[in-house]
């Protein structure tokens, strides 16, 4: 570390300590070993009301600005890592700071594109329309007359964030070293995730790619997504279509209609497209003069695979229908746990934990509270959900809160119920069942092919004593062959029956007794194979007696 860097870190530590002292967070100062950095003018004051700590910590983050605001915003999305009250308080963090001078804006743009600003834009407003800790937005006009919003990154913001991240690693190390009881929160892992998150936040090309995905997905949708102008976009400058309008919170008319549009948009993002806005709060939704909604700020976007989407659909269905057993099974299917966890105990605790919600009408159920309690319980069991699934849960809770803020009569469960009914219907359709059959067949094939390598890996882990007679090996081989043959026959039978069902649905000609002839033939073949299978099993049982 250079002398300059060391001086910057010490100076920042002093600032952190002073801000915490002003908020009477001396308990945290003690834990972070920051007393030596506090000016003598600050007398130790400890908060008597512990419930005030989340709010005071949020105020301290806002004053420290920069990476600390971004850290708080990230933590607000990770209720699986921190207590619910902290996550909810951090979601209030405001990212509005004093703008930097136009001279610097011009300097950064010209350096990025290696040409004068006047060559790039016909007009460029010197006063920004918005300013945040990472960058600020200016209204401009391209040479072809298009009105655009130009987002410019703050000077040296990457170096400032780098200093703060190194300090956060240092503070996390102190907490885990001196306070073992806090290790369950895994502060080092939080900082590491924040570092990755920051890299994306400081790369406007990544945000531009996110916007492009949404723009293509919602091209024919009532929700407006701004277009990216790639010829005027770099890692530090993002140029996109300018959206005229006001924040949705400033609009009084048609609120129920707008809320329904946002919920439907969210369902499409998660259940159909697999790419969703992870922070859909009201500040990111504008109402245009045409009364059309526009979605903005794509710095935090979640991506879910088809497999994860299927599992979340089950969670979603169980929440809307109030099915605790299905919810428990769905969560167990999702999570990644340490070895030794008692899954039966978890399912029992989950059912008891959520009982208070299901004793009342589902129409009055607070889905956000249910989701936060699920994450809280998972944290107690040291369960680690996939990051994108946690973002999905947080986005769901945000959408529900968004709806209730704009429309007191908004009912998340009632709004989503028609979609859930369609979802359940699709899951029972022959096409879906056949798709799941094919997927499971491929998984079975993969596991079967990899079995020898997996067995070798297990054997390498320790000494294994094998004492088997040759006759035993031959007997084992005989039964294994029979078992594999029967499994193959069962799979073929299942495939034939699914194919028959699909052909019946398609009404394929010719028909016999109003049933497709091909389906009848397939069912007959299935019966023949089934009879032979039963006979084989019966003969083997008779021989073994």
Image (cartoon, grey):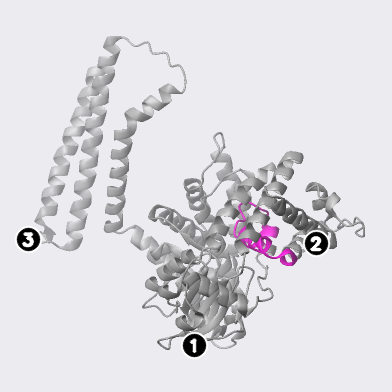
Tag 3's secondary structure? loop
Residue 182: tell me if it is visible.
no
Task: Say how many tags the image has.
Answer: 3
Main secondary-structure element of the magenta-colored stretch: helix
Give the label, 1 or 3, closer to the camera.
Answer: 1
Marks 1/2: CA distance? 43 Å
First along the sequence among labels 1 and 3: 1
Magenta-colored span: 62-88
First along the sequence among labels 1 and 2: 2
The part of the image, by quadrant, that contains residue 211 is bottom left
In screen coordinates, is 115 left or right of 126? left
Marks 1/3: CA distance? 54 Å
Q: Which residue is depicted at the point 46% across and 23% down? A: 461
The residue that label 1 is drawn on is 291
Give the label, 1 or 2, closer to the camera.
Answer: 2
Residue 289: tell me if it is visible.
yes
Verify whether residue 267 appears in magenta. Answer: no
Query: Where in the figure is residue 338, as x and y percent of width and height?
Result: 55, 38
In screen coordinates, is 434 left or right of 375? left
The residue that label 3 is drawn on is 510
Query: Where in the figure is residue 424, as x and y percent of width and height?
Result: 39, 61
The residue that label 2 is drawn on is 19
Q: Which residue is depicted at the point 84% across and 62% down? A: 22
**Which mark is on residue 73?**
none
- Is there CB contact under 8 Å for labels 1 and 2? no
Marks 3/2: CA distance? 81 Å
Residue 494 higher or lower than 225, as above or below: above
Give the label, 3 or 2, closer to the camera.
Answer: 2
In screen coordinates, is 230 left or right of 237? left
Residue 472 higher or lower than 41, as above or below: above
The part of the image, by quadrant, that contains residue 91 is bottom right
């Amino acid at each position: 570390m250079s002398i300059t860097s060391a001086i910057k870190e010490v100076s920042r530590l002093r600032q952190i300590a002073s801000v915490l002292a002003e908020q009477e967070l001396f308990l945290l100062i003690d834990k972070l070993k920051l007393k030596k950095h506090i000016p003598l003018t600050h007398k130790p004051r400890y908060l008597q009301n512990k419930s005030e700590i989340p709010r005071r910590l949020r105020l301290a983050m806002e004053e420290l600005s920069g990476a600390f605001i971004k850290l708080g915003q990230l933590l607000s999305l990770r209720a699986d890592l921190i207590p619910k009250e902290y996550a909810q308080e951090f979601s209030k963090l405001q990212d509005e700071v004093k703008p930097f001078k136009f001279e610097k804006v011009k300097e950064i743009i010209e350096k990025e594109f290696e040409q004068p600003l006047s060559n790039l834009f016909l007009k460029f407003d010197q006063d920004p329309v918005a300013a945040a800790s990472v960058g600020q937005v200016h209204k401009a006009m391209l040479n072809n007359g298009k009105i655009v919003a130009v987002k410019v990154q703050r000077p040296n913001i990457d170096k400032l964030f780098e200093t703060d991240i190194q300090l956060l690693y240092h503070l996390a190390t102190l907490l885990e070293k001196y306070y073992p009881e806090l290790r369950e929160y895994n502060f080092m892992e939080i900082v590491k995730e924040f570092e990755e998150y920051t890299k994306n936040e400081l790369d406007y090309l990544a945000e531009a790619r996110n916007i492009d995905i949404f723009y293509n997905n919602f091209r024919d949708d009532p929700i407006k997504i701004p277009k990216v102008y790639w010829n005027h976009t770099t890692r530090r400058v993002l140029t996109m279509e300018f959206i005229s309008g006001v924040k949705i919170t400033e609009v009084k008319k048609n609120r129920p209609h707008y809320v329904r549009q946002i919920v439907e948009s969210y369902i499409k993002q998660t259940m159909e497209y697999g790419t969703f806005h992870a922070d859909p709060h009201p500040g990111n939704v504008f109402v245009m003069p045409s009364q059309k909604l526009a979605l903005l700020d794509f710095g935090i976007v979640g991506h879910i695979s088809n497999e994860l989407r299927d599992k979340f659909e089950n969670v979603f269905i169980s929440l809307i229908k109030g099915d605790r057993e299905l919810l428990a099974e769905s969560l167990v299917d999702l999570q990644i746990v340490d070895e030794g966890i008692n899954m039966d105990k978890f399912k029992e605790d989950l059912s008891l934990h959520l009982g208070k919600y299901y004793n009342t009408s589902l129409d009055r159920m607070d889905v956000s509270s249910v989701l936060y309690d699920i994450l809280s319980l998972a944290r107690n069991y040291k369960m680690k959900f996939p990051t994108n699934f946690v973002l999905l849960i947080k986005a769901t809770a945000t959408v529900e809160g968004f709806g209730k803020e704009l429309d007191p009569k908004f009912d998340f469960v009632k709004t989503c119920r028609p979609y859930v009914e369609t979802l359940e219907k699709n899951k029972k359709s022959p096409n879906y069942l056949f798709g799941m059959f094919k997927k499971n067949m491929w998984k079975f094939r993969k596991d079967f092919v990899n079995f020898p390598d997996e067995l070798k890996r297990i054997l390498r882990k320790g000494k294994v004593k094998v004492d088997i007679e040759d006759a035993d090996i031959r007997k084992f081989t005989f039964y294994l062959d029979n078992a594999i043959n029967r499994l193959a026959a069962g799979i073929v039978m299942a495939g034939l029956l699914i194919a028959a069902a699909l052909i019946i649905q398609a009404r394929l000609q010719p028909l016999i007794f109003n049933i497709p002839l091909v389906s009848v033939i397939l069912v007959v073949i299935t019966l023949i194979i089934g009879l032979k299978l039963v006979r084989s099993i019966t003969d083997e049982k008779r021989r073994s007696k």
